[in-house]
Amino acid sequence: HILTVDAASGKASQITSIKVFDVSMPVWSPDGKNIAFVTNRSEDPDLDPDSVDIFGVPARGGRARKSPTPIGFKWNLSFSPDGALLAGAEHGFAYVWDVATGKAVHTLIGRYFALDFSPDGETLALGSFYGPVILWDVATEAQEGILDDHGMVLLTLAYSPDGSTLAAGYHDDTVLLWDTATGALLHQMDNAVWRGMVVSSLAFSPDGKMLVSGSSKGIA
């Protein structure tokens, strides 16, 4: 299920009521009114693992609606800042869909797994399983830059609110921070606190001063 948590009170509210177990990759729309997520609603997800669709649900709860995007395995979703585009990884490809029509407006070939739109919507950061992070210009479809290859499985990417820093989380419990203007590595964080935990999600605070990481063991 998907739950939202009130930051002040800590109260959690369940906003989905789905029978299958594999609801994942929730992401807020830029206006905060909806949440997109991926789920397999086939009769037996274990036997039909690629029957994955994107759904959207009101953040306050309500009926989940299926996106018209083609069915297929999907991972990691990211809205453009204006909410018009939704990017996602699918079987190693990265797609950018028009939210209104569900049609793919960009298809990027490469073993991509993690992605995130920059705050200005001009760049899409793409990370592959064992490759470098690619900075891709959304308008020109040109490669803007390449950030150093850590050599481990990359699972998640997150831009800081001002777009100056890009954070990457890896399977080996490492978090890297890059300067997006110069491509320089700013920090490598592998604190013993999360030793042995796969870094599966990252999010900056609105002021960019704090970075929250989620782990495979359910610990943030």
Image (cartoon, rainbow, N blue to C red):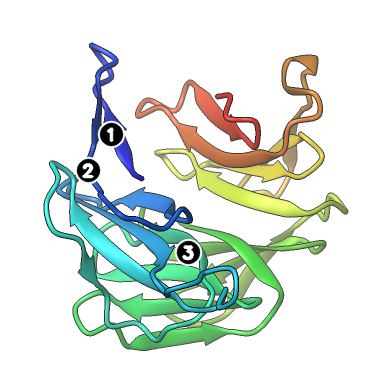
Front residue of 215/51: it is 51
Characterize the local packing of mark 1: few (<14), some (14-19) or many (20 or more) Cα atoms within 10 angstroms.
some
> In this figure, which residue is indicated by the disc labeled 3?
123
User: Dividing the picture into quarters, in which one does residue 12 lie?
Assistant: top left
Label 1, label 3: how far apart the Cα atoms are:
28 Å
Closer to the chain start, of discs 2 and 1, is 1
Q: Residue furthest front?
A: 43
> In this figure, which residue is indicated by the disc labeled 2?
15
Image vertical order of residue 1 relative to residue 190, above or below:
below
Residue drawn at (14%, 48%) of the image: 33
Rendered image: mark on residue 90? none
Q: For the residue labelled by badge 3, is the local secondary structure a helix, a strand or a loop?
A: strand
Disc 2 residue type (three-letter): Ile
Q: For the residue labelled by badge 1, is the local secondary structure a helix, a strand or a loop?
A: strand
Characterize the local packing of mark 2: few (<14), some (14-19) or many (20 or more) Cα atoms within 10 angstroms.
some
> In this figure, which residue is indicated by the disc labeled 1?
4
Characterize the local packing of mark 3: few (<14), some (14-19) or many (20 or more) Cα atoms within 10 angstroms.
many
Disc 1 residue type (three-letter): Thr
Image vertical order of residue 40 relative to residue 198, above or below:
below
Disc 3 residue type (three-letter): Thr
Label 2, label 3: how far apart the Cα atoms are:
31 Å
Instruction: Examine the rendering and report whether any part of residue 75 can be seen.
Output: yes
Q: Which callout, 2 or 1, points to the residue nearer the camera?
A: 2
Front residue of 160/78: it is 78
- If the image is split into quadrants, where does the C terminus sit? top right
Closer to the chain start, of discs 1 and 3, is 1
Q: Which callout, 2 or 3, points to the residue nearer the camera?
A: 2
Label 2, label 1: how far apart the Cα atoms are:
7 Å
